[in-house]
Amino acid sequence: MSNAFSAFKLSDKVYWVGAIDWGLRNFHGYRTSRGSTYNAFLVLGEKVTLIDTVKPKFYDEMMSRIRTVIDPAEIKYIISNHSEMDHSGAIPLVVKDWNIEKVFASPKGVEALNEHFELGDDILETVKTGDTLDIGGATFSFIETRMLHWPDSMFAFYAEEGILFSNDAFGMHLATAEKYIDEVDPWIVRYEAAKYYANILLHLSPIVLNLLKKLPSYNLDIKMIAPDHGPIFRRPQDIQQILNWYQEWAEQKPTQKAVVIYDTMWESTARMASAVADGLIAGGAKVELMPLEGAHRSDVVTELLDAGALLVGSPTMNNQIYPTVADVMNYIKGLKPKNLVGGSFGSHGWSGEATKHLDAMMEEIKIELVKPGIIHKYVPTKDALMACRELGLAVAAKLKSVG
């Protein structure tokens, strides 16, 4: 096998040996417009250790990178911080092809790896919060981060060099040749980090806040954060920035921003959406108007991350919410956003149940309705458009009072 892919040296003992997925555009319903990376790390010591792996189809790429540093037969340990297949999928291949002595994982990680691959208790070994692992010249300590974002998730901290291997926390889906955050356009970093948080971690915000509160008690001298997706944080200001962002996003404090989403059949609901947006603007709110013909669900929740209001427009189809709108609302429901106000609107033909269903769904999500849904038959009249504008004004006023 040729060594067509090279490792990237992070330090004298640590190398990035992962894979860049330039073509990825869908990650279980999340549109990854800029691709992704699957970060794996090789740490040299008396017991050479591989931290996480890659999707199985990138196994050869990972091994090619490893061969530019060492003979893969020298790898003795694997640390699995997270058993989701984009990070654990190549573990059984590494175990099968090379003389691996132990695979270390959290208690739930051991359970998941056995259920995934039937690796067996002879090779799997459990590590818990506070446990350490000396590989000869390098020492790891472990912190279980349950439900960030799977039950098995954990951090591994390489003490001698201050590297926090954080699995999916602090990551982003971003395929890039640059390995460090400070080498990437700051706007892209902010957007992709926010998008990742909104689509993966938003519903786990209480757990994120608890982790951030406890993190100082572990007395970790963090000099680098190496997540399993996206570039690595190496500058103190960048490390502090991502921690600050996570605090901000997890708190979900309402802002003066309103997100308006809608779909339309014959442009009537679209006209209503424009009137709602105009009322919001007149009331002093910042507005993000997102027609679902072109806006993906993952982009909607990204915009919602720093918003204080959600307004939803839908025509009625077969007595129900329009399919694209229902899809996004179901997605939002699962992510459990907090501290939002909002309302609904829509045009209909012979029956008009969509706003009633939307209002019920928004109440279930715990979005505070400023007014009952505005519904109009066929093409909206001047009065109907004025009612939509009044909805926008009312939501803008509510945002000022809660902000």
Image (cartoon, helix red, strand yellow):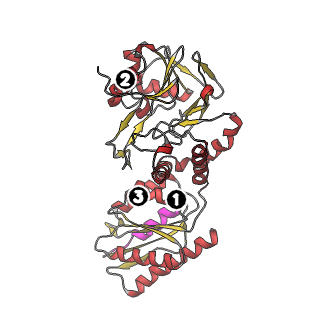
Q: Label 1, secondary structure: give it.
A: helix
Can you identify the residue that label 2 sits on?
63
Task: Indicate whether residue 354 is drawn in magenta.
Answer: yes
Q: Position of residue 263 (x, y in %)?
A: 35, 67
Q: Is residue 169 left or right of residue 379?
A: right
Amino acid found under the numbered disc labelled 3 = Val
Tell me which corner region of the image, top left, top right, bottom left or bottom right, holds residue 63.
Answer: top left
Q: Earlier in the sequence, mark 2 or mark 1?
A: 2
Can you identify the residue that label 1 sits on?
365
Q: CA distance from mark 3 to mark 2?
A: 40 Å
The residue carrying pointer 1 sits among few (fewer than 14), some (14 to 19) or many (20 or more) residues within 10 Å by Cα, namely some
> Relative to 272, does residue 56 appear above or below in the rendering?
above
Q: Label 2, secondary structure: give it.
A: helix
Q: Earlier in the sequence, mark 3 or mark 1?
A: 3
The reply to whether discs 2 and 1 touch (Cβ–Cβ < 8 Å) is: no
Can you identify the residue that label 3 sits on?
328
Which of these two is toward me, 224 or 35?
224
Q: Position of residue 395 (x, y in %)?
A: 54, 74
Q: CA distance from mark 3 to mark 1?
A: 13 Å
